[in-house]
Image (cartoon, rainbow, N blue to C red):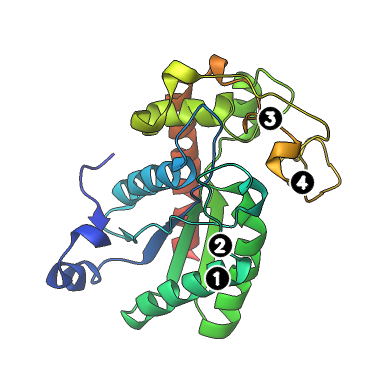
Amino acid sequence: MADKAFVLAEMSWPEVKEALKTVEVAIIPTGSNEQHGPNIAESSDIALATAGARNLARRLYPRAILAPSLPFGVSPHHMRFPGTISLRPETFIEVLRDVVGSLQKHGLQKFFILNGHGGNMATLNVITWKLRQELGVKVAYALHWPSPTLVDKYQRSPRIGHACEIETSLAMHLTPNIAKTEALAKGQMLGPAFSGGMDAKTNDIITANYFDEVTANGALGDATYASAEAGKEMAREIEDRLTTHLEQFLAA
């Protein structure tokens, strides 16, 4: 991995102007500020997406520039836990539209959104089409999440996807400062299974459940099985896979 990366927020305008001579894509991290049980700080989703996006910008240097992160997402299902901040889908769409529109005026026509929050995915599907139709730009997006093969390797509990052994392992490796290793706990599962459209294996009916109806402590899975070593393998796999996809995106 190269040491250099174009990081817009850390550059002066003359530096950005010079970088745009080679930059072909802007990488925009999206996530949320929402509860992650006792296991991870509330910044988890945006922190992980930002760390992963910076690594992608390094790999793709000098063809990519890392745009500032959008720290808030669509998180109404977490609002019953203190600290969560949620945007309306309309707000999320309009902010992303303005960010992309601004960067387009500087000459960029391709954008990749690296998303750290599953609750944003439906809205991202809408915004990518709106941006293509209204601005004529090309947009791709992906969830910062390991492949099913690695999920199967490290999953130790029936229901994962939030502050679980997978996400906590990624945090331990990529952003160890936000992992609450002294307080790791298993998800305290309640009534209905969480159906957010995140688990392709179950093909669940999707319902609008608040998270405190699903888990008393805000976590799924069992973070006591998490490890930085597992997180390292998962992060590398995510970055390898997304680098390949982005190279194909740039070549199209």
Query: Depth-wise, is mark 3 or mark 1 nearer the camera?
Result: 3
Compute the Cα span from label 2 to label 3: 23 Å
Q: Which residue is mark 4?
A: 209
Which residue occupies 21% across, 42% down? Answer: 3
Compute the Cα span from label 3 to label 1: 29 Å
Which residue occupies 56% across, 15% down? Answer: 225
Q: Earlier in the sequence, mark 4 or mark 1?
A: 1
Q: Quadrant of residue 212?
A: top right
Q: Position of residue 108 (x, y in %)?
A: 37, 74
At numbered mark 4, what does the secondary structure look like: helix, strand or loop?
loop
Q: Which residue is mark 1?
A: 91
Do the numbered discs 4 and 1 sit on residues whose CB atoms are within 8 Å?
no
Do the numbered discs 1 and 2 sit on residues whose CB atoms are within 8 Å?
yes
Mark 3: few/some/many CA within 10 Å (<14, 14-19, 20+) = some
Do the numbered discs 2 and 4 sit on residues whose CB atoms are within 8 Å?
no
Q: Which residue is mark 2?
A: 87
- Which residue is nearer to you in this view: 161 or 135? 161
Q: Which residue is mark 3?
A: 216
At numbered mark 3, what does the secondary structure look like: helix, strand or loop?
loop
Q: Is residue 36 left or right of residue 64?
A: right
- Which amino acid type is marked by label 1? Thr
Query: Depth-wise, is mark 3 or mark 4 nearer the camera?
Result: 3
- Which amino acid type is marked by label 2? Leu
- The quadrant of the picture occupied by the N terminus is top left
Question: Is 121 situated above or below 128?
Answer: above
